[in-house]
Amino acid sequence: MTLPFYNYFTHGKKDENTYVSSSWPGLLLSAHERRIKAQSLQPALALSSAVYGGGMLELNRVFNIYVDKHYRCDDPPRDIEQALLEWQERTELCAGLLTAVRLEHTSIQEYTCDAFGLLCCTTAGVSNAARAGSERTVFDANGEKHQATASTLRGTEAVSADYDRHSGTDISDTSSTSSYVPGTINIMLWLNGQMTPGAMVNAIQTAVEAKAAALADAGIEDSENGLTATGTTTDAIVLAVRQTEHESQPLHTYAGTATALGAVIGRLVYDTVTESLQAGLQWKERRGQGDNDI
């Protein structure tokens, strides 16, 4: 495991701002003042939950962009597009993620075999850790705040808090959060191999399971209810697949935990989430702050 950009961000070593992939020829990750940029020489087929460049698409770049932990915005895609234009980056063929995690805590790990190569790049913050399926604060499609109880989760009742849609704040609770709060576990997976669309979905599933396992083993809790967290409220993931036909690389139709590919996805996601999280925890400990403050 490695934090390849640690010295660039903490000690100003400008010559340590690049990471060349060993598992994907031509894939380069670079660190900049406010972003980590991953760029491939050729477009890849991607499945993404990114706030900018989400869905099934072709891309050759993924940006993990740092924002202040107090960042609040009704239109994150607009902010990402404006940032890309400011950096003189093309706004097409790319995905953009937002994070409040310190970028020196970016963890990268790789694996290569005859059948495939895989790079995983993760930043992990848990200030907004949450447990899926639990009773907690939620936001509807209009950004209005609700309290999800056991009955509302079953669809039998809907109770809304007092909410000012224009200001984006909860009138009855000045400590409320908006529907987009950066803390976030952002994961990039770059697979040098071939996958069916179904296998790509399966790979995302496996990655999410590994992320949840890492949080459970780290003892991260949902701050609202004290239950073991399964993620954060704003996690995002991008899976990019090279899809280049090669005699020695089979077409993967599955990527669950019983497959060799799924096992590697799970291990790399687990390890990079753990390493990035530990780096953040150590940074906070030196400043006397709690686990869920990263």
Image (tube, rainbow, N blue to C red):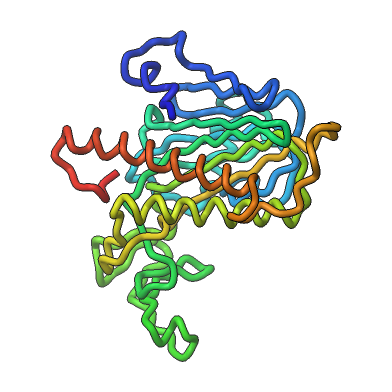
- Which quarter of the rendered picture does the N terminus lie within? top left
113 or 293, nearer to the observer: 113
| Residue 235 horizontal side relative to residue 84, left or right | left
131 or 58, nearer to the observer: 131
Residue 262 higher or lower than 115, as above or below: below
74 or 252, nearer to the observer: 252
Residue shown at the point (32%, 19%) measured from the top left? 10
How many marks the image carries: the answer is 0
Q: Quadrant of residue 283?
A: top left
70 or 58, nearer to the observer: 58
Residue 109 higher or lower than 74, as above or below: above
| Residue 154 horizontal side relative to residue 167, left or right | right
Residue 92 in sight: no
Residue 219 drawn at (x, y percent): 28, 54
Residue 36 drawn at (x, y percent): 51, 28
Residue 277 drawn at (x, y percent): 35, 41
Residue shown at the point (26%, 40%) measured from the top left? 281
Q: In which quarter of the image is residue 131?
A: bottom left
Residue 48 in sight: yes
Residue shown at the point (72%, 31%) measured from the top left? 114
Residue shown at the point (57%, 47%) measured from the top left? 263
Residue 73 higher or lower than 170, as above or below: above
Residue 61 drawn at (x, y percent): 65, 32
The residue positioned farthest toward the bottom in the image shown:
156
| Residue 99 horizontal side relative to residue 97, left or right | left
- Which quarter of the rendered picture does the C terminus lie within? top left
